[in-house]
């Protein structure tokens, strides 16, 4: 995560969708997505919702109640108050 968050050339944006807090750092051809579900129920967020519809999930780098939807690889799943970090390859 450090090569993204501490990189002075990184582009950052923050989005909140239905009480899901999302930070997005873009460096070159990769994007780091940090997400926290502030709800007390499970939710999902699609890459399309994040403006990353043309991206491909590469890896989950933090799992604290989060997962990649393995059937589509385009949706992030969160347990109640779950958090996760994901790398997305920009296409």
Image (cartoon, rainbow, N blue to C red):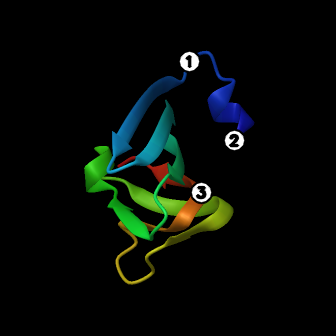
**Residue placed most toward the observer, 7 or 19:** 19
Where is residue 80 shown, x and y percent of the image?
Answer: 53, 67
Which of the two marks, 3 or 1, is nearer to us in this view?
Answer: 3
Where is residue 44 shown, x and y percent of the image?
Answer: 38, 66
Where is residue 75 shown, x and y percent of the image?
Answer: 37, 67
**Residue placed most toward the observer, 51 or 44:** 44
Work out whether 19 lies above or below 74. above
Q: Residue visible at 54% across and 51% down?
A: 36
Residue denoted by label 2: 1
Q: Which mark is residue 26?
A: none
Query: Looking at the image, is mark 1 or mark 2 earlier in the sequence?
Result: 2
Query: Looking at the image, is mark 2 or mark 3 earlier in the sequence?
Result: 2
Q: Residue visible at 67% across and 63% down?
A: 64
Q: Residue visible at 35% across and 49% down?
A: 91
In 3D space, how far apart are the residues under numbered discs 1 and 2 (Cα atoms)? Answer: 14 Å
Residue denoted by label 3: 83
Query: Seen in the image, is 2 located left or right of residue 82?
Result: right
Work out whether 19 lies above or below 10. below
In 3D space, how far apart are the residues under numbered discs 3 and 1 (Cα atoms)? Answer: 25 Å
Which of the two marks, 1 or 2, is nearer to us in this view?
Answer: 2
Residue denoted by label 1: 9
- Which corner quadrant holds the N terminus? top right
Q: Which element is circle 2 on?
A: loop
Q: Which element is circle 3 on?
A: strand
């Amino acid at each position: 995560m450090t090569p993204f968050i501490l990189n002075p050339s990184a582009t950052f944006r923050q989005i909140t969708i239905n009480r899901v807090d999302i930070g997005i750092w873009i460096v070159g051809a990769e994007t780091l997505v940090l997400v926290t579900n502030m709800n007390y129920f499970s939710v999902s967020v699609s890459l399309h919702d994040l403006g990353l519809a043309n991206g491909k999930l590469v890896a989950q780098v933090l799992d604290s109640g989060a997962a990649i939807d393995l059937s589509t690889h385009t949706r992030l799943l969160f347990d109640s108050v779950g958090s996760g970090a994901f790398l997305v390859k920009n296409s």
